[in-house]
Image (tube, rainbow, N blue to C red):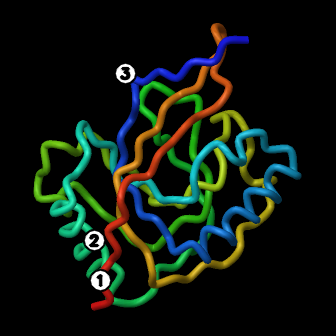
Amino acid sequence: MILKTQKKHAHIFLVLVPHRDVRLVLRNYSGSLFRAGVEGAYHFPWVAPLAALSKPFSVDELKIYARFLREAAGEGKINAVDTASVTAFSGAEETVLFGPRIDIEISQYSFGGSEKVTEFFSPNIIGACLLSAKEDASALPSPPKLSFRAAAVANMYRRTVRTNAAVIGYKWKIGNLCWLPKK
């Protein structure tokens, strides 16, 4: 079996990265989804994709969005209020990202008309698993309650891993973290 990664077809996302303590809780939740029979439970990192990008944001741009997201959170905690799913990959409409929905809403106006943003995701969710659009998410285990202050923004690069005939998974890399300011 020959594995190859489509390097020319990498997707770039702006993501919200919760603190590692929250990611540990989410990893355990993905484990419960896997035990419940969800094959895509470990196919996405425990981050919230906010926007698809044509090019990665610079460190200075990430700092601007980190300040914006802190203001959007009201200088308080970011909460996961329930679960949701979102189509988060252009060209992969049959796949949805499922996980806890966070209570921060962003729009195209939040990014000052950046030409790098090609798509915004709504609702904003932290990825716990990838599902087929045909799968019934209502039968899945409930996520843990999440509330956190510490988070960062980063560029994330995602590639599809294929055999010669089919997609077998995804490979991702999260760039440098730019932490949301305390105030």
* Residue tagged 2: 66
Q: Residue at x 69, y 47 (%)?
A: 42
Q: Is residue 112 rendered to the left or right of residue 123? A: left
Q: Residues within 10 Å of mark 3 (few under 14, many from 20)?
A: few
Q: Are marks 1 and 2 in contact (CB under 8 Å)?
A: yes
Q: Quadrant of residue 32?
A: bottom right
Q: Position of residue 76 (x, y in %)?
A: 40, 90
Q: Are marks 3 and 1 in contact (CB under 8 Å)?
A: no
Q: Position of residue 118 (x, y in %)?
A: 25, 39
Numbered badge on residue 181? 1
Viewer-closest of 150 and 108: 150
Q: Residues within 10 Å of mark 2 (few under 14, many from 20)?
A: many
Viewer-closest of 92 and 159: 159
Viewer-closest of 7 and 121: 7
Type of amino acid under label 3: Lys
**SS label for mark 2:** helix
Farthest top residue in view: 164
Q: Which circle, 2 or 3, is nearer the viewer?
A: 3
Chain-order first, disc 3 or disc 1: 3
Numbered badge on residue 8? 3
Q: Residue at x 72, y 50 (%)?
A: 137
Type of amino acid under label 1: Pro
Viewer-closest of 163 and 41: 163
Q: Quadrant of residue 108?
A: bottom left
Q: Is residue 129 rendered to the left or right of residue 7? A: right
3D distance between C-alphas at marks 1 and 2: 7 Å
3D distance between C-alphas at marks 2 and 3: 28 Å
Task: Give the position of the N terminus as an image quadrant.
Answer: top right
